[in-house]
Amino acid sequence: MATGDDAGDLRALAPQVLGALVRRYGNFATAEDAVQEALLAAAVQWPREGRPRDPRAWLITVASRRLTDLLRAERARRDREDAAARWTPPDQLLAPPADRRPQDSDDTLILLFMCCHPSLSPASQIALTLRAVGGLTTAQIARAFLVPEATMTRRISRAKQRVKDSGVPFAVPAGPERDARLGAVLHVLYLIFNEGYATTSGPALHRRELSAEAIRLARLLHGLLPGDGEVAGLLALMLLTDARRPARTGPDGALIPMAEQDRGLWDAGLIAEGIALVTAALAHGTPGPYQIQAAIAAVHDEAPDAARTDWPQIMALYELLARVAGGPVVALNHAVAVAMVKGARAGLDLLDDLAADERIAGDHRLFAVRAHLLEMSGDHAAARAAYREAAARTSGLARQRYLNAKASRLTGPG
């Protein structure tokens, strides 16, 4: 089977190969099946026979052959010509060869817009993007959505069929249509980045390849829309967050909270790039939620140490963010900022109000923040119980270990 390097390469190549096939043949669902079979063939053959000189071309050739076989079989079952006429507009029939490298764009970006087609529900857009662009398996996506794998299989199948039936051409949409999809594209990219930066399940704290892919796609999108402040804001937010990754885990893989991280390990290049991006974006027009979040990340990254963080500015930015795009997670982070400025009791009072919001009432993050603020207030017994409750509610093993360790280190009655 594939080595670790091969597996990583295959995951990175999968959306490029899929994009090439969809550009050439259309038929998203069948193309995806063909790509999966080509990846499987590579995983078996490459370790035995050696890597081809051009892995991408090899995969496209194998996937194209398999796609041809699948389409022939489909033709035998029904009149495929009608379906092909709906799927492939006449102006797309002279598409470039499937293995020609794109020059002015990246097929993955086109796939991203296709997966965020407005005919799909937000949940289906995210699931299909994670499958086709992010390279996650259906089982991994099902775990991320907290649904059975069979449910996710049906959801992705329906999404692919709906995209196929829509007859959308394989191209980045323009004008109002592009604007209508851009919000979903940004949302999906941020979800992919977060799943890579703070993996929601399994033994690892992060999946570097997912975050890297989200950043790569955000860079492409920024190149396509350099004047869009929210695109720039999202890219800046990703860079400023990813810059802390080297200090986020210890040698044993254990989680290190931001306040305890060695800031000398933070990536100064990414921080400088992120700050430049968000500074330029904020200079034009009213800031959107991604620009505000990037500004918050920049304040954290510019602090020489945790004690000298400008918490009053962060609190004010969260209040602005709540007015632009409020939600329980924003309220939770605002409570932390309030506690850092006004004291733990003020933050805990805000958490009491937030506990009535069923969207986050059972989330481990609410219990973890409460535990932290209780520890700040000196109530170690209540903090210990809250840390243990938070650990029981998270599915990430590394985060469970961190929260249980925090509980064990606290002393006092209770």
Image: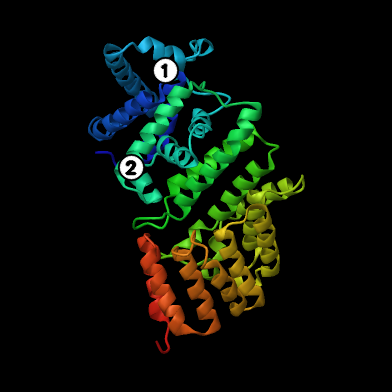
- Residue 89 image position (x, y, % from top left): 50, 13
The reply to whether residue 272 is visible in this rendering is no
Q: Quadrant of residue 57?
A: top left
Which is more foreground, mark 2 or mark 1? 2
Kind of residue at badge 2: Thr
- Residue 343 image position (x, y, % from top left): 63, 78
SS at mark 2 in the image: helix
Contact between marks 2 and 1 (CB within 8 A): the answer is no
Which numbered marker is on residue 151? 2
Which numbered marker is on residue 194? none
SS at mark 1 in the image: helix
Q: CA distance from mark 2 to mark 1?
A: 28 Å
- Residue 198 image position (x, y, % from top left): 45, 56
Residue shown at the point (34%, 23%) measured from the top left: 63
Residue shown at the point (57%, 70%) measured from the top left: 353
Q: Quadrant of residue 158?
A: top left
* 285 sits to left or right of 311: right
The reply to whether residue 363 is visible in this rendering is yes
Residue shown at the point (32%, 22%) measured from the top left: 62
Residue shown at the point (71%, 49%) measured from the top left: 287
Please give the residue where the numbered disc 1 appears in the rendered image: 25
Question: Around disc 1, counting alpha carbons within 10 Å, would you say few (fewer than 14), some (14 to 19), or many (20 or more)?
Answer: many
Above or below, 261 relative to 234: below
Kind of residue at badge 1: Tyr
Nearer to me, 65 or 335 = 335
Q: Quadrant of residue 330?
A: bottom right
Location of the C terminus (image quadrant)? bottom left
Residue closest to the far left: 48
Above or below, 380 relative to 333: below
